[in-house]
Amino acid sequence: MIADQLILNKKSAKTSYKEDSTSEKPIRSIAKAFSWRVIGTLDTLIVSYILTGKISVAASIASIDFVTKMILYFFHERFWNLIKWGK
């Protein structure tokens, strides 16, 4: 039963991005990266403050962390979107 559904629903390897309903648009990846980074940055800010005891140092660390990890997450999401496994 499940195998039949997999075979019947299997898409052609030539499916374009616009036809691929399981693919995410880049703007969705950006929104997910941003929302996750807000959460991650708050964590980094708190941990940095606990370790340093200085809010200015903690904010500097969190700011750099926010930008670099959001960029890395975006490319990570786009790469995984190319992989058909698990879709």
Image (spheres, helix red, strand yellow):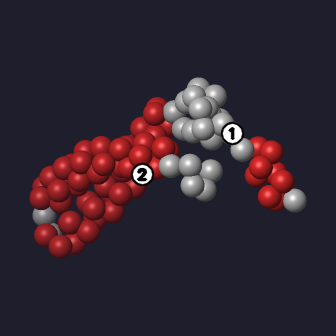
Please say if the residues under marks 2 and 1 sit with CB atoms less than 8 Å apart: no
Residue beneath the point at 35% across and 57% down: 40
Q: Residues within 10 Å of mark 1 (few under 14, many from 20)?
A: few
Q: Is residue 33 visible?
A: no
Q: Position of residue 62 (x, y in %)?
A: 23, 54
Residue farthest to the bottom?
51
Look at label 1 and name its amino acid: Lys
Q: Nearer the viewer, residue 30 or 83?
A: 83
**Residue 36's mark?**
2
Residue that mark 1 sits on: 11
Q: Nearer the viewer, residue 75 or 48?
A: 75
Q: Secondary structure at mark 1?
A: loop
Q: Position of residue 29 (x, y in %)?
A: 46, 40
Residue beneath the point at 41% across and 46% down: 79
Please state if 36 lies on the left or on the right of 48 as rendered: right
Q: Position of residue 28 (x, y in %)?
A: 50, 37
Look at label 2 and name its amino acid: Trp
